Structures are given as structure tokens and as C-alpha cells.
Amino acid sequence: PFVWLPLGNLALLTLAAVYSLGTNRSDMTMGIATPLALQVFEIGCLGLVTFWLGYLMIAQFFYFADTFNADRRNNAIFFWKSMPVSDLKILTAKFLAGTGVFALILFLIALVSGLVFFLLFNVAGLLMHNLLLPDPLTLLGSLVQVSLFALVYWVLTMIWFAPIFAWVAGLSAVVGRWSIALAFVVPGLIIVVGNIIFFRYVRRRGSLWGLLSHRITPLELGLTEQDLTKLAGIPFKAGDFIGRLIANVDWPGMIGGVAFTVIVIALASEWRRTRL
């Protein structure tokens, strides 16, 4: 389902776009010049990246909510116990499959959707006389630039959200699918109880709330309105945006998140080892 469902979504979106173009439902009364058309194409590519990354995050949450406990329900754990592989290696492999292999699959699907969008955009340029497109090589170059930036953003996002996935996966090793609810309930209770007990001594909502709200915030580029104004009409350059992204990453928080992830996986593997 992790592969076929997004491919099915891509097929439906493609069919809808083809139907819209074929029935002239997307005709425009106002013209779009070449520089603006290029920017529209780049924004569309970035929108596709955002869509698939959001899809990946949701799918990963439910994957990690069961991955450390799934083999216990169907007794597959006895197979793993018979292998000369430690529980730590097994859980590490499962975690890397979620953050690495699955993320790579969705990234490739995102690339395919970008190529489909590239083809449909060129077809739209042939059908709509008011849409003045640059040459296909220019559009393809923009797609490559957006893809390079998306790859770096994809990797850093997986590392940034790794402690959240590890938290959910660690809970699944103990309580199974109840980790979906407890992933929110446990920190919520800690925040509420902390505010009640230390009402006069801590800032509103507490430091844990600040830490969590910072962690669940997507990585930002630190662009101001002036920056956006300057970038308007300029072709997308992956190097510039990657540099901005790296400069705005909270690297101490990133390293701390990786350390938390390692600790949680180690504790989950120890729990798994002692439970059977």
C-alpha cells in the first residue's frame, strides 16, 4: 500500500489534469508571459514536493506507530529471535527502512509527478495561446533545480523529525498500536501537570511545549518579504536555496534529536529483548 496508494493518487491527478486540458476547462482569458509562466511552473513543482512530503510524514507516523510491535502479533518475532541478529540491529533496520527506504520511494514518486507536470505544462502551452512558455529545456532545467533542492530538504527533514518517529516507535514497542494516542497524550499530560504544579515559576505552557512546537515546525529558509520580492521573476537556483536552508537549520537541535533517537531505539531494543 505504501507504494501503490501514492501511485494511484498520482494516476488520478494525472487523469484529472488530462481531462481538464482535453475538455478546455482550464482555458484562460488573461495572458501569462514567459517569465511568469516559468515561475508558475516552479511554484507548481514546489507544491508537488510539499504535497508528497506531507503524505510521507503522515504515512511514516502510522508506520512507526506499529513497526516495533507488528512481528509480535503474528509470531514473526520467533523467526527474528532464531536469527543471529540482535534486537538493536532489528529495530535499527526497521527505523532506517521508514526514514530511508520509504522516504526514497516517495521522493522518486515525487520526481515522477514532476515529470508528469512538466509534460502537462508543455501540453497546456500548446493548447492555450495565452500561456507563453519558455522552451522545454528551460523548464526541464528548472525541474532539475527544484529536484536538487527537494532532495536536500527531504534528507534534512527526515533527520529533523527522526526523534518524533522514534518516540512513536518506542511507544509501539511497549503498548503496540496504542502508541498513536499515547504519542499525544503523554506529552500533553506532562505539559498540563507541569503548568499546574509550577504555575508561578515557569513560562506559560512550559518549556516542553516550546521544545515540541519547535520540533514539529518544518524547516524554514528564513526568507523575508524583501527576499521574496527580489526572487520574483528570477529562475529558481538550488544552490542559493540550499545555502539558505543549511544556514537556518538548528544544528544543535538536529544533533540532540539524533542522540534522542539513538537512545530511544536502544531502550526499545532492550525492552524487546527482556520481554521474550
Image (spheres, helix red, strand yellow):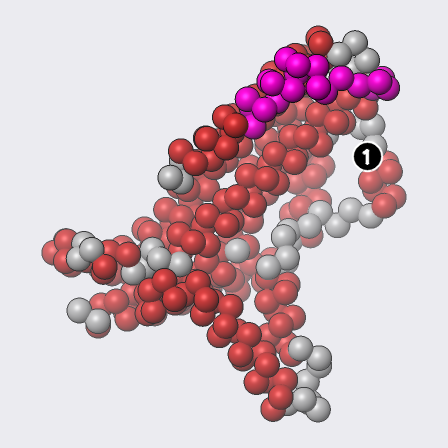
Quarter of the image for the C terminus: give it. Answer: bottom left
- The segment highlighted magenta reads 13-32
Q: Which residue is drawn at the image coordinates 67% and 77% (left, top)?
A: 205
Residue 160's spot in the image, x, y percent? 55, 55
Q: Residues within 10 Å of mark 1 (few under 14, many from 20)?
A: some
Residue 169's spot in the image, x, y percent? 39, 61
Q: Nearer the viewer, residue 226 or 171?
A: 171
Residue 78's spot in the image, x, y percent? 14, 58
| Residue 265 in view | no
In the image, farthest residue toward the left: 82
| Residue 154, picture quadrant | top right
Residue 17: say if magenta: yes
Q: Nearer the viewer, residue 267 or 189?
A: 189
Quarter of the image for the N terminus: give it. Answer: top left
Residue 229's spot in the image, x, y percent? 87, 38
Name the residue that disc number 1 marks: 231
Q: Secondary structure at mark 1?
A: helix
| Residue 68 in view | yes
Q: Which residue is drawn at the image coordinates 56% and 28% (left, top)?
A: 13
The image shows residue 123, relative to residue 60, as above or below, that is above
Left or right for 39, reference 9: right
The image shows residue 147, relative to residue 135, as above or below, that is below
Q: Nearer the viewer, residue 199 or 6?
A: 6
Q: Which residue is drawn at the image coordinates 29% and 60% (left, top)?
A: 69
Residue 92: say if magenta: no
The image shows residue 31, relative to residue 98, as above or below, that is above
| Residue 7, picture quadrant | top left
| Residue 3, picture quadrant | top left
Q: Which residue is drawn at the image coordinates 60% and 36% (left, top)?
A: 49
Give, as a three-letter code, the residue at label 1: Leu
Left or right for 162, reference 76: right
